Amino acid sequence: MASRPVTVHTSVRLRAVAVVVALLTLLTAMGPVTSARAQATATDPATDPSTTTTEGSVTVDPSAPAVAPTLPESGLDPLVTASPDELVARPVPGPRPEAPDLTAAGAVLFDPADQVVLAGVDPQVPRRMASTTKIMTLLLALEALADGSVAPELTVSPFAEEVDHAPGGASLDLEAGDVVPVEDLLAALLLRSGNGGAVALAEHIAGNETAFVSMMNARAVEMGLDDTTFVNSSGLTDDEAHHATPLDLALLGIEAMRYPSFAEWAGAASYDTGFFGVEENRNEMLTAYEGTIGIKTGFTTLAGECLVAAAERDGRILYAVVLGSDNRVADTSALFDHGFEDYARPTPLVAGDTPATYRWAAGEVPLQVAEDLARTVGAGATVETVTRLAPDASLPVASGTPLGEVVLVVDGEEVDRTPLLAAAAVQPSTDTAGAAVADTIRAFARLGEQRQAVAA
């Protein structure tokens, strides 16, 4: 499936201008490193614009605007092809249950199966996102590893060490000169959220953090996350320009969870990260809410408690995001309870099922469902299937020929349908006269619909 075209809206252009201005301001201000705060210091100690320095293993010119490397190829077709505006506007069939009260300033509950928003608090309003930023950092690193554009090990730079040891920030106890397997660092970064680890990855992939941030923003645009902007790789910043909407973060989390290693790390309450040993996951939801399978926490004083989470129950997976929460565990748990208890996803048929048979005088053929027939609906909805057959399909019929359809009806509205395909080929009868009369009678009978109730 091809990626959908990216429409550059006015807001995106304005955001891009703002980012360029911010980057130029940062580059102009670069001087001696005087603070341990990762997001408040320049990455280079030189004051002479003509001087070059080495960050990790890449020599860069601090006076030149950062040029980000080409984005790595993900090798995966996008799962979500609609824009956030389209996703929010999609209706959910059946009754619409009342959403829970939350402390979060921004939130969303997203169902990826139907790509619909089930609940939200200003789901498209950008807010500070703290360390949930690292989902994008990890995604770019995994994509770079997958396409072979980066080495499997990195060397920690002095700047990455300084960021990692910043007072009050999450740390992986990195030391300059450490040679670290990238996958070990990724696992530790997701579980323990060390800020220096994010910088080390940024330098390894793009040469310096500024160039990596350009990659982050380019990837956000590519994904259609028009209300997301990054100013660093870790999320430790007081810059209001570093923000995302709850819905954008849900879509970002869905993309990252497509990588088996990311999903494994995100869903582990503790994990042996190799170089860093066994790390405990900071995501409290993994032990507080049954069925949680990830993803990433975040917190700063300005951002409040933040969480991008995913949970699975009875074969359904939902994503919840809370930003600016007073209690991210309680808020996220309430959202998941709402999604799993107040909504259902009846699936009366799955691809390959044979719910009907098509008959002629010459023979008969089972009809196979082409794809799953399912839809997320509000609890209490009346759900049924309607089977319709083509009245007068003539022979011969090749395998795979559409001979009807099954429609999913919710509260009287047709909301989904799947073709019924011939499971085998059928040849015409040699007794053409007798067959014609019999098939005419069958064609009349096929004009009727077959309805069947479905438990919601």
Image (tube, rainbow, N blue to C red):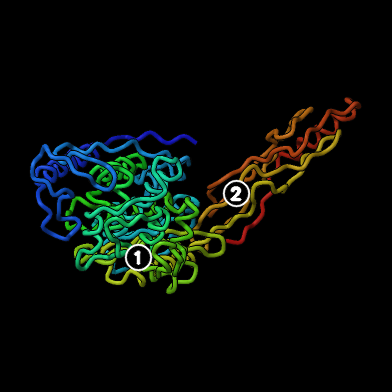
Query: Which label belongs to residue 192?
Result: 1
Looking at numbered disc 1 in the image, what kind of residue is underneath it? Arg
Q: Does 342 sit above or below residue 256?
A: below
Q: Does 141 sit above or below residue 302?
A: above
Query: Which label belongs to residue 373?
Result: 2
Looking at numbered disc 2 in the image, what kind of residue is underneath it? Leu
Q: Residue at x 85, y 30 (%)?
A: 437
Query: Which label belongs to residue 57?
Result: none
Eye-nearest disc, 2 or 1: 1
Q: Does 12 sit above or below residue 190?
A: above
Picture coordinates of residue 361, whole percent (x, y)? 86, 34
Q: Nearer the N terminus, badge 2 or badge 1?
A: 1
Q: Determine the image quadrant of residue 37.
A: bottom left
Q: Is residue 206 left or right of residue 348?
A: left
| Front residue (pair 309, 408) | 309
Picture coordinates of residue 46, whole percent (x, y)? 11, 46
Q: Is residue 424 visible?
A: yes
Query: How would you rate the neighbour count of disc 1 (Cα within 10 Å): few for under 14, some for 14-19, many for 20 or more?
Result: many
| Quarter of the image where the C terminus is located | bottom right
Circles 2 and 1: CB distance less than 8 Å? no
Q: Residue at x 65, y 47 (%)?
A: 351
